[in-house]
């Protein structure tokens, strides 16, 4: 392949040849006595392009439909496909846009599709939403609701017989110090974590520790939040732990640890900033479409058939409108964990 200099030289030769063939050898010369002769070509007018470039078909038409992504799966079942078609038809009726469904093989593929404009409406996991927000490819529409809440909290727990101080007032249900003050006592201590993808049992607490510049020893991953409570209760696996609010009351702990609420104390509680899944739409869609889609989803899930379909497609049956700002703290702490969030989605 020629280098840049040779390429430019070749282009200049071709341009000269083109000019010669265009204008022939009859360039009029203007000669002045005492000056050097110069050639002044008489250029023809630049031709006007009359054929317009092909335009992209209007969004929401048969040629350029809105794309509704089903839950990621390499092999979606017939039931999921049928439920997706039902939802697409309902949204199509309410919005007036032509809508088709796709089943992305993974959430990583889905996040990429949203960034490229190859998907417009989708359900995202908390980490999937954070990744999609990094390039502003989505805006949140509806948050999944569990136990009547859209967000939930987490907590750092300690053994009351250990060396640590609780900065949480159980009676009043509030922290008595800021996070930096409460967490500095865990410097060089060993944590018990739930698992490597848990927002409440690892990622968000780690983000808070990093934000407070607290360096801990390598943690023990115990595969389950009740196990974290057990580890802190036993006080021979780790120095402190992190769980959702309130893993200490798990029924599977009740028989073996009747005094768990007394022996395992909350050192500091993280407010309810951890989300469940949500429904997001492409940020490139018209703003006025936002409320229409929100209303359509809520009306759809408000029917028995719609609720069943939403359970089949996405696995949830209750949701409420939400704004992007509600996720700000979760996004901050997730990023402060310094973990590769793309490795936490499937």
Image (cartoon, rainbow, N blue to C red):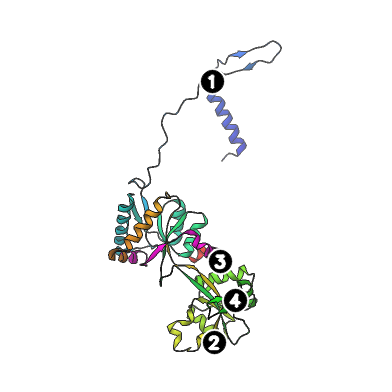
> In this orientation, which residue lies closer to the viewer: 329 or 118?
329
Label 3 and label 2: CA atoms lie apart by: 29 Å
Q: Which residue is mark 1?
A: 43
Can you tell which of label 4 and label 2 is closer to the viewer?
4
Q: Which residue is mark 4?
A: 176
- Magenta region includes residue 312: yes
- Horizontal arrangement in the rendering, residue 239 relative to residue 122 (left or right): right
Q: Which residue is mark 2?
A: 263
Query: Whole-percent x and y of residue 44?
Result: 51, 20
Can you tell which of label 1 and label 3 is closer to the viewer?
3
Callouts 3 and 2 close, C-beta under 8 Å: no
Can you tell which of label 4 and label 3 is closer to the viewer?
4
Q: Which residue is mark 3?
A: 333
Query: Which region is colored magenta?
Result: 309-334
- 1 or 2: tag closer to the N-terminus: 1
> Which mark, by number, is residue 22?
none
Callouts 4 and 2 close, C-beta under 8 Å: no
- Magenta region includes residue 326: yes
Label 1 and label 3: CA atoms lie apart by: 64 Å
The quarter of the picture where the C terminus appears is: bottom left
- Element on which disc 1 rests: loop
Query: Whole-percent x and y of residue 296?
Result: 34, 57
- 4 or 1: tag closer to the N-terminus: 1
- Element on which disc 3 rests: helix
Q: Residue at x 37, y 51 (%)?
A: 66
Query: Whole-percent x and y of residue 196?
Result: 52, 72
Can you tell which of label 4 and label 1 is closer to the viewer?
4
Crowd tier of the residue under label 1, counting other residues whose Cα lies within 10 Å: few below 14, some 14–19, many 20 or above? few
């Amino acid at each position: 392949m020629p280098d840049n200099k040779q390429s430019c030289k070749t282009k200049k030769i071709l341009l000269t040849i083109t000019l010669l063939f265009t204008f022939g050898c009859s360039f009029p010369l203007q000669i002045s006595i005492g000056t050097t002769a110069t050639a002044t070509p008489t250029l023809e007018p630049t031709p006007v392009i009359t054929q317009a470039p092909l335009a992209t078909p209007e969004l929401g038409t048969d040629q350029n439909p809105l794309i509704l992504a089903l839950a990621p799966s390499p092999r979606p079942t017939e039931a999921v496909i049928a439920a997706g078609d039902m939802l697409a038809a309902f949204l199509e009726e309410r919005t007036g846009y032509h809508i088709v469904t796709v089943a992305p093989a993974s959430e990583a593929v889905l996040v990429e599709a949203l960034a490229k404009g190859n998907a417009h409406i989708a359900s995202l996991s908390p980490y999937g939403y954070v990744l999609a927000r990094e390039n502003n490819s989505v805006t949140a529409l509806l948050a999944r609701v569990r136990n009547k809440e859209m967000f939930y909290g987490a907590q750092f727990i300690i053994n009351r017989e250990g060396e640590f101080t609780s900065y949480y007032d159980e009676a009043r249900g509030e922290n008595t110090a800021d996070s930096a003050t409460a967490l500095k006592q865990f410097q060089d201590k060993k944590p018990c974590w739930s698992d490597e993808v848990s927002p409440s049992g690892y990622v968000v607490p780690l983000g808070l520790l990093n934000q407070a510049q607290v360096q801990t020893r390598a943690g023990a991953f115990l595969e389950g939040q009740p196990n974290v409570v057990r580890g802190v209760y036993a006080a021979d696996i780790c120095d402190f732990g992190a769980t959702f609010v309130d893993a200490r009351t798990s029924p599977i702990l009740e028989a073996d640890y009747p005094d768990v609420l007394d022996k395992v104390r909350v050192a500091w509680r993280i407010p309810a900033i951890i989300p469940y899944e949500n429904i997001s739409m492409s940020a490139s869609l018209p703003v006025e479409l936002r409320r229409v889609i929100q209303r359509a989803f809520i009306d759809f899930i408000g029917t028995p058939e719609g609720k069943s379909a939403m359970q089949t497609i996405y696995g949830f049956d209750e949701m409420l409108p939400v704004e992007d700002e509600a996720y700000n703290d979760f996004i901050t702490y997730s990023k402060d964990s310094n973990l590769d969030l793309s490795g936490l989605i499937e």
